[in-house]
Image (cartoon, coloured by chain):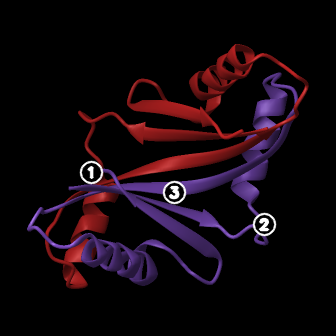
Chain colours: A red, B purple
Amino acid sequence: MKATVIVELKPSVLDPQGKAIQHSLSTLGFEGVEDVRAGKLFRITLADRGQPREEIERQLRQMCERLLANTVIEKFSYSIDD
Amino acid sequence: MKATVIVELKPSVLDPQGKAIQHSLSTLGFEGVEDVRAGKLFRITLADRGQPREEIERQLRQMCERLLANTVIEKFSYSIDD
């Protein structure tokens, strides 16, 4: 079973990496790039033991809260692919 | 207009960051994590000048090829959110 987790800075948090990318794109000649925000994505393969979907979602949420995201400055979302 | 770009290592390329995360999750007590692959995500806001969709896709593809992805070891995908 595969899941995708996305971790992004909260909208109120400055993103210097995104700003640097925006600037580089502009230097390369790409016009009209108004904003870039950089985030992280994790593709997680979980053993399929017939757990209910809620149990998998609970586990993913815990993974985000305990390891993958810094919830002070980051928000996370996840989806189960199959 | 907003677009999301995802850049991931090609499946054949080793991902030490993903392996480290997998190991940490296991250490934290999460069972059944068979694989983790780490990737990058970019939320790009583009000025809306009434360009045709193909033009926006062409621009996003060029951004990936010229800056966001190292196409030797990474693959990319993009979606236009609205």
Position of residue A18 in the picture relative to residue A33 (left or right)? right
**Mark 2 crowdedness (10 Å alpha carbons): few <14, some 14-19, many ≥20:** few
Q: What crowding class fits label 3: few (fewer than 14 Cα within 10 Å), some (14-19), or many (20 or more)? A: some
Residue A56 rendering spot, x and y as whole percentages: 72, 22
Residue denoted by label 1: B82
- Calculate the distance from the C-alpha at mark 3 to the C-alpha at mark 1: 21 Å
Q: Could you tell whether A28 is left or right of B32 in the image?
A: left
Q: Nearer the viewer, residue B26 or B43?
A: B43
Depth-wise, is mark 3 or mark 1 nearer the camera?
Answer: 1
Relative vertical location of residue A38 with respect to residue A71 in this rendering, above or below: below
Mark 3 or mark 2, which is nearer the start of the sequence? 2
Label 1 – label 2 distance at C-alpha: 34 Å
Helix, strand, or loop for circle 1?
Answer: loop
Q: Are marks 2 and 3 on the same chain?
A: yes
In this view, the residue in front, B17 or A35, is A35
Provide the residue designation for mark 3: B40
- Are the residues under marks 3 and 1 on the same chain? yes
